[in-house]
Image (cartoon, grey):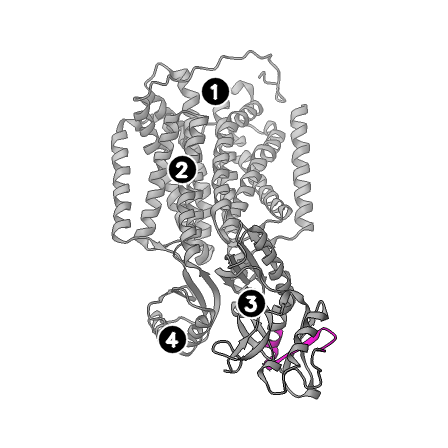
Amino acid sequence: MSRAPMWRAVAALAVIATSLLLALTMTPRLGLDLRGGTQLVFETKDSPTVRADADATDRALDVLRRRADALGVVDPTLVRSGERRIIVELPGVLDPREASAVIGKTAQLNFHPVLGPAEGGGEDGQKLKLGPVALSGAGVTDAAARSDPQAGPGWFVTIDFKEPGPWRELTGKAACAPPGDHKRRVAIVLDKEIISSPQVDESIACEVGISGGTTQITGSFTPQEAQNLAVLIKGGSLPVPLELVEQRTVGPTLGADAIAASAKAGLVGVILTAVFIGVVYRLVGVLAAVALACYGLISYAGLVAMGATLTLPGLAGFVLAIGMAVDANVLAFERAREEYGAAPRRGLKAALDRGFKNAWSAIADSNITTLLAAGLLFWLASGPVKGFGVTLAIGVLASLVSAMLITRVLTAALIARVGPRASGIGSIGRVRTWLTRRDPDLMRGRRLWLAVAAGLLVLAGAGLVTRGLNYGVEFTGGRIVEFGTSRPVDVAAARQAVADAGFPSAVVQQSDDAISVRTGQISADDVVRMEEALDRSVGEVAKQRDELIGPSLGEELRRNALIALAVALAAQLAYLAFRFRWTFGAAAVAALFVDAAVVVGAFAWMGKPIDGVFLAAMLTIIGYSVNDKVVLFDRVRELWPVRRGEPFGRVMNTAILQTVPRTVNTGLGALFILAALAVFGGDSLRDFAVALLIGIIVGTLSSSFVAGPVAIALEKRTTQPPPVPAAPRARPARRDGSGAVV
């Protein structure tokens, strides 16, 4: 074995061993949509005295962290996002009412002297006139909820101060007033509301005050109210007000079902794909299937090693990247078939080596474009969709290692031990043979293909005009709640129950064993009232999912979605123009526009939601579709210099025919994965899979029938000369392992 193959074998073994070690010793971090819990997103706001900048947000984050710890939530996650946002994840917390009320309450605690009765403010309906702040919550060191059976029933909150002086001074001045006088009271104010105004005990002398730096807040507290108040006081005051802009709650059962469904979809998709490439490419296909299993191990190891959060859309990205791994293998195998067909005397191993080398350019270009889409998702998306961008990027990188390293090592080790027929690369394949024999001139009808594309654009536009887009809550703001049902439910009865609960304009829909209700900005208490109404009307229901998006955040996410799509198209154009010619880049983007418009139009006609998951699907379609265009234009770039005497339309037609086997085989591999997601992935992933199915089919066709004709038309209008053939490089002959001279 030569030095280079030995190096690859050692590297492949090291990657597999490291991945196996990481997979066995580390556990993945599941997002709340998979393990159940509540995610709250707060946005800091300017106060009259403090600007809500990054520093103020960090200080607010510290306060929220202390409150989450005091609440006893297991493994809470709190991080700052951007300059003004704080993301709080509370695993296991399924009722967001108490969490948001305690975690995000402004909790500005102050102690005031009471000057007498007045208009405004008050406790138990009694209005008091207060003096200036004598002591703030910053002077509090501890607070606890307590009860004392000897003193009678009820709960109270004890407060410990950092320094006893200010409290002693405040109570000493109040003690100078006669018993029963309002001025003998001290007002404890939380968020501009008097929560207690106790009288200073008659045993306290004037100007002496209460020593010891401890006091009690008494009142008609329940145990939970006393505990929540103690948490707020102990956690401290927030430096700036907070606004809840997003809330997501997912039940643990829904998350477990999603994991099981995604695992089933992934397993079925991988098996179908492995069988398919094994049948088409025989020995090298079987070895590629083994490498696909390694891809799964490497992707999983990369996920846990980075500490990335695995979300439900992330699972889809994990499964979808299998299609990318198949694409790299197919490109290399098709190139190897061409090399063997052109020079069979060199042997199978030499053909395989040259196939991998010649395919590298197209593989690298296509994967870079997908990484661009994944990066845009991570940068501009929100919530679980960010996880899709992360896992897609990890999957793309793992697919490169799987195909270009592991598959290459395995095939190089065994290819010389079988004959050309069993190897899978000994013939150009039935599709290529048929196309070579028939040699159809597809570009003769390029005006017809462009007319068909224009017709699809008109049809998509008609859907947008007549049906409109069904924007999800993420892009409009509002609340969507999903209730699981134990038996089939009449959607009309459910709609009436929701209307009777006070929400006549709510959109009520039924899917599988669940009822989804979409409303405007309603509170968590309203959701409870809605759930109780459904319980009475249609039978027992259980809340499975609850998402609240503020109107400002919805507008921002909608704007970011448009920016993401525009930037994706611009980035692909810039990259393709840099790697190829501006005419090729423009042709590819024109085809991408058709792909995107057809998918959007189809969703408009079907009334399916346009949400964050749809954004993930669209960016994936753009990345996947560009892959196909890259492969085509890479072949054009290779053929054109050696066929300078032929019309460019004929060169384009030849390139299309030569890349059809790769396009068909890669497309079928991806369709197996997406069909499995559509069938087994459940409602959460079905729309995602449908969008990708439409996008990949249209994107595959648009490469030949839109990008090709547009490139031909643009080349007629450019003065840029055709590429010059590369100068041949002389190299010494050597023998490969089979004895053939290469």
Q: Which mark is residue 342?
A: 1
Instruction: Name the front one of labels 4 and 1.
Output: 4
CA distance separating discs 4 and 1: 75 Å
Crowd band around label 2 with a 10 angstrom C-alpha radius: few (<14), some (14–19), many (20+): many
Amino acid bearing label 4: Ala
Residue bearing mark 4: 501
Whole-number angstrom distance, CA of label 1 to CA of label 3: 69 Å
Q: Amino acid at mark 3?
A: Ala
Magenta extent: 208-228
Do the residues bearing badges 4 and 2 touch, measured as CB atoms within 8 Å?
Answer: no
Q: Quadrant of residue 568?
A: top left
The secondary element bearing badge 2 is classed as: helix
Among the two numbered marks 4 and 2 on one chain, the one whose residue lies closer to the N terminus:
4
Residue type marked 1: Ala
Amino acid on which disc 2 is placed? Leu
Res 99 label: 3
